[in-house]
Image (tube, rainbow, N blue to C red):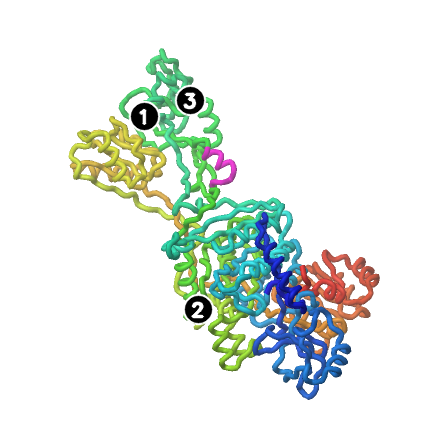
Amino acid sequence: MASIDYLLNKITNPELRAKLQSEIGRIQKQKRFGLVYEDHLPEATLLYDVEVRRGQKVTLKADPLKQKFEVLNISNGVARCISLDETEEQTEVNVEELVSYANLQGDSDGHSFGVNELLPYADFGDPIYPYLQPLDKIKNAPDSALWHEVIEADNFHALQLLAYLYPGQVDCIYIDPPYNTGARDWKYNNDYVDSNDSYRHSKWLSMMRKRLLLAKKLLNPQDSVLVVTIDEKEYNHLGCLLEELFSCAYIQMISSVINPSGSSRKGYFSRSDEYIYYVFIGDAKIQKHNNDMLRPSSIKKVRWHGLLRGGATGKRKARPNLFYPIFFHTKDGSYHSIGDSLTIDQNPDEIEVPEGCFMVLPISSRGEEATWEIQSRTFIEKLKKGYIKFGKWKPGQNKRSISHLQEGTMAAVENGEVEVFGKDSEGTLILGNSLKPITPMTTWVQQSHSAGDMGTTLLTKFLSNRPFPFPKSLYAVHDTLRFFVANKPNALIVDFFAGSGTTLHAVNLLNAEDGGNRRCIMVTNNEVSEAEERNLKAQGKTPTDEEWKDLGIARYVTWPRTVASVSGNDVNGKPIAGEYLTYLEVEKETARKFKKITFLKDFNKLTLSERKDIVSELSKGEIAKNKVADDSRYIVDEDADVALLLDDTAAADWLNELESADHVQTFIIITQNNRLFTSLKSQITEMLGTYKTTEPKTLPMSEGFKTNVEFFHLGFLDKNAIALNRQFKEILPLLWLKAGGVGECPSIEEDSLPHYVIFPKNRFAVLIEEYAYCSFAEEMRISENIDTIFIITNSTPGYQEMIEALKPKRSYQLYRDYLDNFRINYIQ
């Protein structure tokens, strides 16, 4: 129910109520610009682990939040209550006045329940005080200080807690909220929302707005990103909401194919994609990828281009200044020097060759005078930088092939976009095989992003037969995060709609790939599905029963998946079969391939159009048809991995061209001559040898990940007990997180509290009793690696004096700091 409807129903005068309803209905039908929706009554919080006591708001365990009461008194296990739904206001109520009211009205207006039938709750605006109860942990890297956290909680309250713990410190928030499809896949105020709910869009927006406002507080204002996935049901509403809340940010939307086979819509287009909103905060920018995300394989390879210019513009008479000699030593074929350009009237025979050298001129395979691609001074500049490459030389030969890097590749090298391994003996740069960083497109078509194969099917490896609807592809989340945290090895990443736990899984894979130390905090509730809820209620179970809790998403799916992925063993304890895809690469040497084509007896008798078609077909489209000229006898293309001999009488010229063609992997030879084919295969293999390629490296799933994770439940504490220092042990995990969550979460096993605690591995310390300050201060002077100090004191001047003497990097006063800042559940 929207807030306006709730208020209208409070009007006792039926005539006035009807008139107001009519007028409000007319106003609602008016068209207005911007995001206009009903704001709803704030969600209530069920306090499962809080004791029922006098003056508390409660609801029935069997049907939470359908009816709301306030406890007047408790006697012999029976709570006498008054209905809050029957009062005019749902604000703070004076218990004594309620008791008097109930006595005047008699028992008929009161309600009595067994205490075990009731469940405390808090309306938004009622202060509640959280703590983290450790539930479980997995430690697969005992020596590592990196610990991730999985928190079982309503994400609104977890976000308010995180907003205190890490304000402005989060590098990336990735969320996959409910898509509001109408399929009863999410709850509002403990009710499943379905397509029959006329307010489902505004309920969804109300829910999202509250959480996004808190997410905004978490994000690092200098350089961070918010990522939200959505489908067509709410993408327009979400876009408007993001623009409203993040008006100073740059926002982009990506279309990502997650279901290549499509999801049918009767009478409409079949949906194959979903949408991803990116909110760029501050100076956040994407890190270039190794493909453009649109084509299956868009890796740009580093090519050395032949220095000899071809085509009509490569004739000497067209550019005589590009016709000059290059000299090499006769003894070992090494480079000697470069000569001046010849005028169009000069005869090459007039060139004076240095003693002990041979000369190489730009002469085409047909013996025609051509040109080099660059001027002589440019040649010298490139030579000094290692951008000139000379082909293999055999003793006695008076020729040597020459290649160079073109402008785009040189810029990539100088920008660090190509890996440089050094220089060879002739001063040529030794480069990686590919130009990795590429600006990605806004449309993603990646086979690994299929939610079926890399989401549902992959999840089954870890959880066996535990169902979870529509999990994300591990690699879709991995890619999404990688764009922003590839250059942030210590990034803090938060997901407060964790679902099956794909985000932490992806972060662990990223860290395994590049040795990063990125930390992930995931938040998920422990709701059961609608069908499971019906079955459990039929058995008389409530959310407070262990059978109910064990089937909740956090305990049945999210945490088991996390344990399985980290350990490398599925939920049944068996090693997980399969390999992770990664962006790591391994280099391998591969033999070059040779193909003999015998069905063409005379390629030269074909028409030009037929020749183009044949070349395109034989090269599988790698060589464009416009590369085939009327007089083409062979083709060696710097941008293609395949080379063709079209006329076997040009075999010698083809071999000369291939001397600098290290990039060619496949050689197609049109010939009827078996002996020639065998000879060419042998000569090319000897001349070029094997070629080096890179392929993606995989990681065994059974090896798991070298990392650690702690599983917490978010509970709530009594304010007075905190102030009296009675619940320090419960608050300790929060102090650990506030200090950075370094190392394993500490605990105190003793019944009585020590005067102070120092945790060097966790980099924080706590002074519990003020009178122990001198001893504490002395230990602080000799302690190393303590960055954060907490001091429990009611005296602010005393706290300031103690901290001034200790001078830590960070300090906090307890419990004032806790009570002032950990109070959550307030209305935004």
* Residue 510 drawn at (x, y percent): 50, 55
Decide: is 612 above or below 515: above
Which residue is farthest top? 345
Q: Main secondary structure of the magenta part?
A: helix
Decide: is 587 above or below 746: above
Front residue of 52 and 149: 52
The span shown in magenta is 408-418
- Say what amino acid the circle numbered 1 marks: Asn
Front residue of 21 and 330: 21
Q: Residues within 10 Å of mark 2 (few under 14, many from 20)?
A: some
State the residue at coordinates (76%, 63%).
813
- Say what amino acid the circle numbered 2 marks: Pro
Frontmost of labels 1 and 3 is 3
Between the residue at mark 1 and the residue at mark 3, the CA separation in whole angstroms equals 15 Å
- Does the rendering let one see residue 96? yes
Dot 2 falls on a residue whose secondary structure is loop
Residue under pointer 3? 338
Residue under pointer 1? 398
Between the residue at mark 2 and the residue at mark 1, the CA separation in whole angstroms equals 72 Å
* Residue 444 drawn at (x, y percent): 44, 48
- Say what amino acid the circle numbered 3 marks: Ile
Task: Mark 1 and mark 3 in contact? Answer it, CB < 8 Å.
Answer: no
Frontmost of labels 2 and 3 is 2
Frontmost of labels 2 and 1 is 2
Residue under pointer 2? 467
- Does the rendering let one see residue 241? no
* Residue 569 drawn at (x, y percent): 45, 68
Q: Residues within 10 Å of mark 3 (few under 14, many from 20)?
A: some
